Image (cartoon, rainbow, N blue to C red):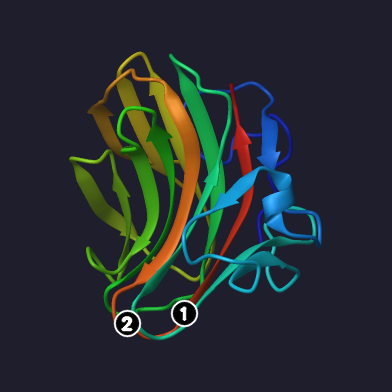
Amino acid sequence: MGHLASGVRFGGGPPAPAGSVVDDFEYADSIANHGWTFGAGTSDAQVFTSTEQFFNGARSMKSVRGAGAGAHELRFFNPPRTGDYDYEVAIYDTGFTTGQAATYFAVRDDAGLANIGSGGINTYSSTTHYWVSDGVSTNTSHPRTNGWHVFRFQRTGTLQNIYIDGTLRLSTTVSSVAIDSLFHASFNDAGGAFHSFLDFVRSLT
């Protein structure tokens, strides 16, 4: 279990100021009451806060996927912003290796709702390594291990760096278009059942 205090660098990269917490999931009511919007087919029965695992505090967001095709999608709407961003999120790896499944976090733009920075577990790409992407380029060189892992998405100008546990895994030129929302998805396409945890989403800028 990790702990990310305000201003402490866990996700790597250059020094960053004390951040503002987007959501720490330290509540027992619906996450829809705390800035998240459910996508089609997603409900409180499938995505909720849990004390089963936690990175910071005593709760995290848990997503439960049954066997067979389907998806859970959530969007957190920050005010649209242009320019630089610097987000961190903790994702818990339960060790699932079911084929055709994924759980990930993304920064989404406001021009067609494309994911311009994504990271997490994606067994389409690899069952043994984590996946990060800018929507065009991908990297799967960071080995998976059970437990909490911090993904950091940092854009300065048009340069985006994506870190996993302090290691730079993808550095590419991306659009400077405004941010529409933060996005979380868990899905499988005829894969087996699995569950995942996400915690302590925060902005460092």
Q: Is residue 120 left or right of residue 91?
A: left
Please state which of residues 39 and 120 is positioned toward the viewer in this rendering. 39
Q: Is residue 24 visible?
A: no
Quarter residue 46 falls in: bottom right
Amino acid type, mark 2: Gly
Q: Which residue is mark 1?
A: 194
Marks 2 and 1: CB-CB under 8 Å? yes
Percent from the top left, x then y, of residue 28?
A: 81, 62
Question: Residue at left 30%, top 70%?
Answer: 128
Query: Residue drawn at (54%, 39%), measured in percent from left and top?
Result: 88
Q: Residues within 10 Å of mark 1 (few under 14, many from 20)?
A: many
Q: Amino acid at mark 1?
A: Phe
Residue 167 lies, in percent from the top left, at 40, 42
Above or below: residue 22 compared with residue 73? above
Please, what secondary structure does the residue beneath circle 1 have? strand
Mark 2 neighbour class, 10 Å CA radius: few under 14, some 14 to 19, many 20 or more? some
Q: Nearer the viewer, residue 68 or 157?
A: 68
- In the image as oriented, which residue stretches furthest toward the front? 40
Circle 2: element type: loop
Which residue corresponds to the image point at 28% horizontal and 22% vertical from the top-left? 175
Q: Is residue 14 above or below residue 163?
A: above
Rendered image quadrant of residue 141: bottom left
Split into 4 quadrants, where in the image is the N terminus? bottom right
**CA distance separating discs 2 and 1:** 9 Å
Mark carried by residue 90: none
User: Which residue reaches farthest left?
Assistant: 136
**For residue 136, above or below residue 59:** above
Tag 2 residue: 191
Residue 2 coordinates in the image, percent (x, y): 66, 55
**Relative horizontal placement of residue 7, taking residue 46 as reference (left or right):** right
* Direction from residue 101 to residue 45 in the image, left or right: right
Q: Quadrant of the C terminus?
A: top right
